[in-house]
């Protein structure tokens, strides 16, 4: 496997812990958790692993500014802003509002961040967004359907003005970012000896899956390092067929990037899209129940958007008897907990 340039700042390996009280309450398989919510950078999360490789690439390219995009409460943007601060890059974040805006004319200049910040959004400066501001990221607001265009304009403008920008894709999910999770699979397998999993890798790994980089990296790692269990992505916001295609394709280009000659087809990728609920970032009863169960039984926080939804899916699948009696599940905690403090998700604590 090719050795990729990497900046080391994540706290690795992340620990694996058993969740005995949750396992007992659900009465099925033994559940463990891999604590990627503790990767160490500004409340942690799965993007920190990806950023170790993405920032190394940015540096090698002589970049001085990082530009990326995401939702208003994006964990990826928060971790990118923190990494930028830590390594002395400027940072611009293109964040999507849910307020529709008219289409930007082709030659429109990107206005100053404040101009595009919805005036009423001062109450939105909470959770990840508050942290973005502390890390001094420039925030550019856009409607979802204009995101790609605004991102492109932002990049071009920064380039023209000599700021040497480096574009990090949505979710950090390209071959460079996904490579981090290929190595994370190796980390997990190496770790089984001496971890609560005692020598044997889990039968199942369950992760929330959205832009597909985490799953693609793990899928490739499973193949390269011989993980024999199953890897299930609970889709956060995408139809299963589309997400399977994305993951297989990204696993292929990640293999190329690492100089490995393996190929994947969409039908090898396990994705469940039964838990999309009201859509991205819309918290429903299943997420609220999952957040409450993890908190009350294990003192462990899962987030309203990703891990809460994946946990709700896992809980439902356990209740439906989807897993063999003595099987062992590793719930890969991808982080996201700062969103618990977002005004937008105030409701998660109220009805458990
Ligand atoms: C981004 C994110 C995910 C999804 O990871 P992808 O690589 O985009 O599929 C899952 N959980 C959290 C907390 C995230 O921030």
Image (cartoon, helix red, strand yellow):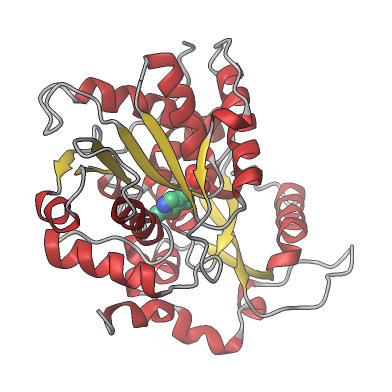
Relative horizontal placement of residue 43, taking residue 97 as reference (left or right): left
- Residue 318 placed where, x, y %? 30, 51
* Residue 54 can be seen in this image: no
Relative horizontal placement of residue 316, taking residue 197 as reference (left or right): right
The foreground one among 157 and 235 is 235
- Residue 349 placed where, x, y %? 27, 79
Relative horizontal placement of residue 336, taking residue 98 as reference (left or right): left
The foreground one among 268 and 346 is 268
| Number of dots carrying numbers | 0
The foreground one among 279 and 146 is 279
- Residue 160 placed where, x, y %? 77, 49
- Work out whether 25 lies above or below 333: below
- Work out whether 35 lies above or below 52: below
> Which residue is found at the position 29% from the left and 44% from the top?
331
> Which residue is found at the position 56% from the left and 67% from the top?
279
Q: Which quadrant of the figure has residue 186?
A: top left
Q: Residue furthest right?
A: 106
Q: Residue furthest bottom?
A: 120
> Which residue is found at the position 48% from the left and 23% from the top?
220
The foreground one among 351 and 64 is 351
Q: Quadrant of the C terminus?
A: bottom left
* Residue 65 can be seen in this image: yes
- Residue 8 placed where, x, y %? 34, 31
- Work out whether 8 lies above or below 314: above
> Which residue is found at the position 37% from the left and 58% from the top?
336
């Amino acid at each position: 496997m090719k050795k990729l340039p990497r900046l080391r700042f994540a706290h690795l390996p992340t620990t694996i812990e058993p969740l005995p009280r949750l396992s007992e309450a659900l009465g099925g398989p033994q559940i463990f958790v891999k604590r990627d919510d503790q990767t160490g950078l500004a409340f942690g999360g799965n993007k920190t692993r990806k950023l170790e490789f993405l920032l190394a690439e940015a540096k090698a390219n002589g970049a001085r500014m990082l530009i990326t995009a995401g939702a208003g409460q994006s964990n990826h943007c928060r971790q990118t802003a923190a990494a930028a601060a830590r390594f002395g890059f400027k940072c611009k974040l293109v964040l999507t509002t849910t307020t529709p805006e008219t289409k930007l004319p082709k030659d429109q200049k990107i206005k100053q961040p404040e101009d595009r910040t919805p005036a009423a959004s001062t109450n939105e400066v909470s959770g990840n967004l508050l942290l973005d501001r502390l890390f001094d990221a420039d925030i550019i607001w856009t409607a979802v359907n204009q995101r790609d265009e605004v991102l492109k304009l932002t990049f071009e403008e920064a380039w023209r003005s000599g700021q040497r920008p480096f574009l990090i894709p949505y979710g950090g999910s390209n071959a460079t970012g996904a490579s981090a999770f290929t190595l994370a699979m190796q980390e997990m397998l190496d770790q089984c000896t001496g971890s609560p999993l005692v020598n044997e890798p889990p039968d199942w790994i369950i992760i929330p899956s959205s832009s597909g980089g985490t799953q693609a990296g793990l899928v490739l790692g499973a193949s390269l390092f011989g993980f024999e269990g199953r890897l299930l992505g609970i889709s956060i916001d995408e139809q299963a067929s589309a997400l399977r295609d994305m993951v297989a394709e990204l696993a292929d280009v990640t293999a190329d990037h690492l100089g490995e000659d393996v190929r994947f087809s969409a039908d090898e990728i396990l994705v469940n899209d039964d838990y999309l609920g009201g859509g991205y970032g819309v918290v429903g009863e299943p997420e609220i129940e999952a957040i409450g169960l993890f908190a009350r039984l294990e003192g462990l926080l899962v987030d309203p958007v990703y891990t809460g939804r994946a946990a709700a899916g896992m809980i439902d699948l356990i209740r439906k008897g989807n897993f063999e009696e003595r099987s062992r599940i590793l719930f890969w905690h991808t982080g996201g907990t700062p969103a618990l403090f977002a005004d937008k998700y105030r409701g998660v604590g109220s009805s458990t």
